[in-house]
């Protein structure tokens, strides 16, 4: 028994020593990195500030750089570039341009962190010159590197490269569709036609279709509402139906009421909820009966959407009567009245 206790104590001591060694190692590495950055800042911040003040040219800085100093210059330039725009940013990028080729091998590094840093730096300082290699990183084995690459490409907004991101959206199925849609919508209306074509085909991977629909809603692409309405089939995936209904809610017209009404009785509560919300936006007076039934839906989420939609269709009297009653959904009706149109 005593031997077992001694063994346990020795194991605990060994574990504590190992953890202490890890902490010391991490601290030493962080301090080393901080010292390196400090040296780089001392070396390159003054000449870059002279450049921005008009007292130096990119060529002057190039003449000062030795082979061992190039990496530090590039990293400092990247830090400056993130905070600059216009002519000043172009000047900093021009300083770094001759030294960016040395980063390309980093895209094949065994360490994901190095690959990610290479993508970020190349995108920040020389996207146009290195776009082909950056786009290739969309297929990186690391989901984080691939996502950083997608965001880098989307930020530059060149349609041909953004199409490569859209074609690989299934790679990002673990990421939030809302995040991906916002990333694509930030590119601008020039990508709407490509997204619309994918949504119309309805044969691609589910994540691509869902994100396309959500991005088109954010882009306020009116023609996409017709495609979404045509795609409302009960046998489609509920996630896609929900995205299409969100698009119709944002941009739909009265001509889309028929397919939306059909979705109000779909087996999936998510689909029914979005159908109620869309009817609140494009429905007619006669849809108030359907929305009133929706408040009695077994799903509370469907009930909430139906109540808000009923208010949008001037069903205030019905909601007030329901709120004043002993009905199980009286609170839902009261909330819809007090919170306004959703």
Image (cartoon, rainbow, N blue to C red):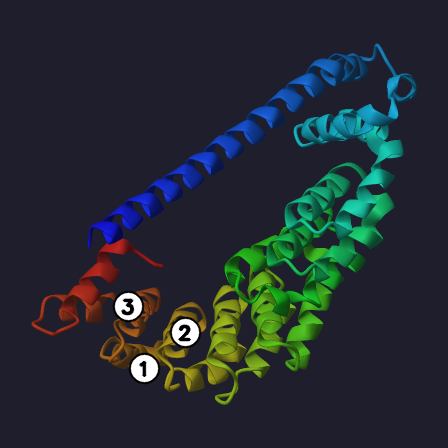
The image's mark for residue 304 is: 3
**In this orientation, which residue lies closer to the viewer: 41 or 232?**
41
Circle 1/circle 2 CB separation < 8 Å: yes
Mark 3 and mark 1: span between their CA atoms? 14 Å
- On the rendered structure, is 229 left or right of 52? left
**In this orientation, which residue lies closer to the viewer: 158 or 261?**
158
Name the residue: 48% across, 75% down: 239
Name the residue: 66% across, 23% down: 36
When asked about the image quadrant of residue 209, the answer is bottom right
**Disc on the earlier residue, 3 or 1:** 1
- On the rendered structure, is 317 left or right of 181? left
When asked about the image quadrant of residue 274, the answer is bottom left
**In this orientation, which residue lies closer to the viewer: 142 or 96?**
142
Mark 3 and mark 2: span between their CA atoms? 13 Å
In front: mark 3 or mark 1? 3
Q: Which residue is mark 2?
A: 279
The image's mark for residue 86 is: none
**Disc on the earlier residue, 3 or 2:** 2
When asked about the image quadrant of residue 216, the answer is bottom right
Residue 191 can be seen, yes or no: yes
Helix, strand or loop at mark 2: helix
In the displayed structure, 47 sits above or below 100; it is above
Looking at the picture, how far across and down is residue 101, in whole percent? 86, 40
The image's mark for residue 290 is: 1
């Amino acid at each position: 028994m005593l031997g077992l206790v001694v063994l346990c104590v020795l194991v605990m001591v060994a574990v504590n020593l190992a953890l202490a060694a890890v902490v010391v190692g991490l601290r030493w590495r962080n301090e080393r990195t901080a010292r390196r950055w400090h040296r780089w800042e001392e070396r390159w911040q003054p000449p870059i500030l002279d450049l921005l003040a008009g007292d130096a040219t990119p060529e002057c800085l190039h003449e000062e750089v030795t082979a061992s100093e190039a990496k530090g210059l590039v990293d400092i330039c990247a830090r400056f570039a993130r905070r600059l725009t216009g002519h000043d940013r172009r000047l900093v990028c021009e300083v770094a341009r001759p030294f960016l080729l040395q980063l390309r091998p980093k895209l094949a590094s065994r360490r994901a962190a190095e690959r990610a840093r290479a993508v970020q730096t190349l995108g920040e300082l020389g996207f146009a010159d290195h776009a082909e290699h950056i786009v290739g990183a969309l297929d990186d084995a690391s989901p984080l590197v691939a996502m950083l690459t997608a965001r880098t490409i989307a930020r530059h907004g060149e349609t041909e490269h953004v199409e490569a991101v859209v074609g690989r959206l299934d790679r990002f199925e673990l990421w939030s569709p809302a995040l991906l849609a916002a990333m694509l919508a930030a590119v601008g209306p020039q990508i709407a036609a490509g997204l619309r074509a994918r949504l119309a085909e309805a044969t691609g991977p589910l994540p691509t279709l869902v994100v396309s629909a959500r991005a088109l809603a954010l882009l306020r692409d009116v023609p996409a509402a017709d495609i979404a309405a045509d795609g409302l089939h009960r046998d489609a995936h509920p996630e896609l139906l929900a995205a299409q209904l969100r698009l119709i809610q944002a941009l739909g017209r009265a001509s889309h009421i028929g397919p939306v009404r059909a979705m109000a009785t779909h087996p999936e509560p998510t689909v029914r909820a979005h159908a109620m919300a869309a009817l609140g936006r494009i429905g007619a007076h006669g849809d108030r009966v359907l929305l009133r039934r929706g408040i009695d839906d077994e799903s509370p989420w469907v009930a909430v959407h139906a109540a808000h939609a009923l208010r949008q269709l001037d069903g205030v009297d019905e909601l007030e009567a329901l709120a004043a009653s002993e009905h199980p959904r009286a609170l839902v009706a009261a909330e819809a009245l007090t919170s306004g149109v959703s």
